[in-house]
Amino acid sequence: MKVVEVFKVAPSSESNELPTQTTLPLTFFDIFWLRVPPVQRIFFYEFPHPTSLFFDTLLPKLKHSLSLALAHFFPLAGHLTWPLHSQNPIVTYKTGDTVSLTVAESHADFNHLAGTDLSEAREIHHLLPHLTISHDQANVLALQVTLFPNSGFSIGITSHHAVLDGKTSTSFIKSWAYLCREQQQSPFSLPPELSPFYDRKVVQDPNHLDQKYLSDLLKQDGANNRSLLVWDSQVPEDATRGVFHLSRSDIEKLKQIVVSKKKGNSSNLRLSTFVLSVCYAWVCRVRAEETKNKRVMLGLNVDFRGRLEPAVPTTYFGNCVGPRFAIVETSEILGEDGFTVAVDAVNESLEKLKEEGLSGAENWSSELLELSKADLMIFVVAGSPRFDTYSNDFGWGRPKKVEMASIDSSGAFCLSDSRSGDGVEIGFVSTKGAMRNFGSLLRNSLQS
């Protein structure tokens, strides 16, 4: 790969609403993710045109629309800091702050990287920008556009998890795409469903969860450790990436399996596309990886925007997600009724959410620490089909493929909508043997 140029893109000064300086304190939802490694996504787009068209037409539009989008999402150009005078870490933005946009050229096989075959996890890492994070300051966002001459281009995005969750990140990308696609019609405005909401007062914290989480963080790796450095996570050498598809008819078959097993006692169960897909993937993966741990856990990230009192606006900028855990005996997952066991466990976890809400949230950070030390194989779900990632059309068509590269080291599942619009995609990283086993299990179990 060859780096062509690195641009520093500032929020557009054409907007009259752009503040000269802003400070956003982190809420307890943000602090929970403070030391989690950045989230990384790559969008692959077909562009079978000469290189000159990319540099003369496409790139200028991407840069201009990015500047317009940053005028709405200006904190993304700022920095995360933890000043001594501030109880909580804060995001600061001031005039002159910018986002790094790397433009590169790659002669790798575009169709292979944007295809559906198994591949080495590291093959796409050169398409991702680096996010600068030190002990006392962190950038919020970094971007990279990589041209594959006469084939396509990719947009790589690295974002700080303590500043934005999946919903906020997705909203920014949709806004950038919208402004690039529609900039001739409406150069500055965004539709209401994309316009970010910044008032932090809507996230109420009467139990001072922020201070509880900060106390837990300050005790890690030494006393009073105010470092902003994220946890170091390595990608295994033999890591293989795969993306698998479940169609609507596949998901309907899964639903019928549960209904038949429950013999009429399934009316109270959530049998949504999300629940059925992640439970099925969970069972297939435990079997494919021949998990030896006594118990297995599926960690879910739940959006609390509509679950708080009062409800938080859907366009709220920042984190508003919290964890739920489903834990079962490995032997039960491996048993004949493993799938229904998984569905029951996830339903029980989500049912408690109705009853408890944020009750117990004071233990989220300590629970995670305890679970990491237990004889437990942990799987986490990232992403959501509701993010509708394949709708991000910058004016040259929908993505050919969308990857969440940050699951490489976390071992998480990535669940998303599919390019065809039929069903969902499930992506994750494991050993090559386990990936092949998973693919066989996924298909064979549905055909039997």
Image: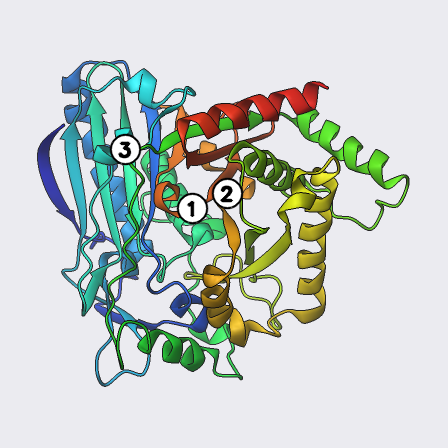
Q: Report which quarter residue 360 is drawn in.
A: bottom right
Do callouts 2 and 1 mark residues in contact (Cβ within 8 Å)? Answer: yes
Q: Compared to 111, does 442 lie above or below?
A: below
Report the residue marked by disc 1.
170
* Earlier sequence position, callout 3 versus callout 1: 3
Image side of residue 136 versus residue 396, left or right: left
Q: x, y (%) of residue 162? A: 36, 62
Camera-near label (2 vs 3) is 3
Q: Nearer the viewer, residue 113 or 122?
A: 122
Q: Nearer the viewer, residue 275 or 41?
A: 275
What is the three-letter code of the residue carrying label 2? Phe
Image side of residue 411 versus residue 40, left or right: right
Q: x, y (%) of residue 66? A: 26, 44
Circle number at residue 232? none
Tag count in the figure?
3
Q: Nearer the viewer, residue 281 or 267?
A: 281
Report the residue marked by disc 2.
387
Q: Compared to 240, does 276 lie above or below?
A: below
* Earlier sequence position, callout 2 versus callout 1: 1
Check disc 3 and report its element: helix, strand or loop: helix
Structural distance between the alpha carbons of marks 2 and 1: 6 Å
* Earlier sequence position, callout 2 versus callout 3: 3
Check disc 1 and report its element: helix, strand or loop: helix
Residue drawn at 37 percent across, 77 percent down: 214
**Residue 184 visible in the shown view:** no
Report the residue marked by disc 3.
122
Camera-near label (3 vs 1) is 3
